[in-house]
Amino acid sequence: MHALRSPQKLLMIRHRKYHTDFYEDEDFYTLHAEDQLPMCPNRKYFGMPAIQFPIRDSRIIGSCNGILCLFVPLENRISLWNPSIRCKITLPDCPWRCYYMVEIGFGFDPITECYKIVSIPNPNCGSIIEDSSFVYNIKTRAWCTIAPPTHFVYEGGFKSVFSEWSIALVGRTL
């Protein structure tokens, strides 16, 4: 991961601190520059300051230029977090809030020079708005409706990959 205008690459490493009570386990993260990584991965990271994840029980949807897109299933919310400067923003609700019924992607649009989040309904969840997908624009701070991709067969899950704001959904088209 690296910032858009910064040549330095950083690596975020997740650590788990185990306790005797399973429910007390903690995750913490550390940021490392390339020259700070130990030669032996089994060594402890003494002296590295821990970074607290801004949202407990969140999962990473994607990352782009050092910014992480996080989804919190219990709250049905999407947030963006920059761990380098420890800044988090929470997006307003998408018009279609049932995130377990959609596929979410995150990327940078070089034409408009802004970050965007795309939400595409899963065709097998019986969505009442299957003919609509949504894009959130960070600059305008608004969701807008877009045409969904052509019909495809859903086989157990999608994985989205963004590259130069082109989304590639791994799946099978009709």
Image (spheres, rainbow, N blue to C red):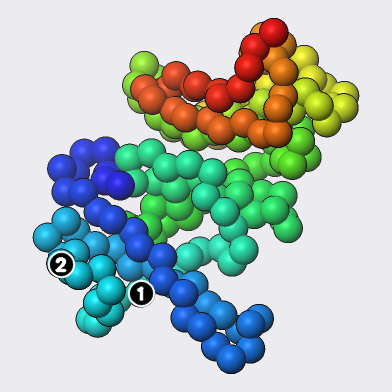
Mark 1 residue element: loop
The image quadrant of residue 153 is top right
What amino acid type is highlighted by mark number 1? Ala
Q: Is residue 43 left or right of residue 83?
A: left
Residue 161 is situated, as x and y percent measured from the top left of the image, at 47, 30
Residue nearest the observer in this picture, 35 or 97: 35
82, above or below 113, in the image: below
110, above or below 66, in the image: above
In percent of the image, x 25 and y 54: which residue is there? Answer: 10
Q: Residues within 10 Å of mark 1 (few under 14, many from 20)?
A: some
The image quadrant of residue 32 is bottom left
Residue 46 is situated, as x and y percent measured from the top left of the image, at 24, 82
Circle number at residue 50:
1
User: Which numbered disc flags the more N-terminal residue, 1 or 2?
Assistant: 2
Q: Is residue 2 left or right of residue 100?
A: left
Point out the residue furthest to the bottom here.
20
44, above or below 156, in the image: below
Observer-side mark, 1 or 2, equals 2
Q: Are marks 1 and 2 in contact (CB under 8 Å)?
A: no
In percent of the image, x 40 and y 29: which residue is there? Answer: 108
Residue 75 shows in the view: yes
In percent of the image, x 46 and y 74: which residue is there? Answer: 16
Residue 90 is situated, as x and y percent measured from the top left of the image, at 57, 50
65, above or below 60, in the image: above
Q: Is residue 102 left or right of residue 91?
A: right
What amino acid type is highlighted by mark number 2? Met
Residue underneath mark 2: 39
Point out the residue furthest to the left here.
35
Residue 142 shows in the view: no
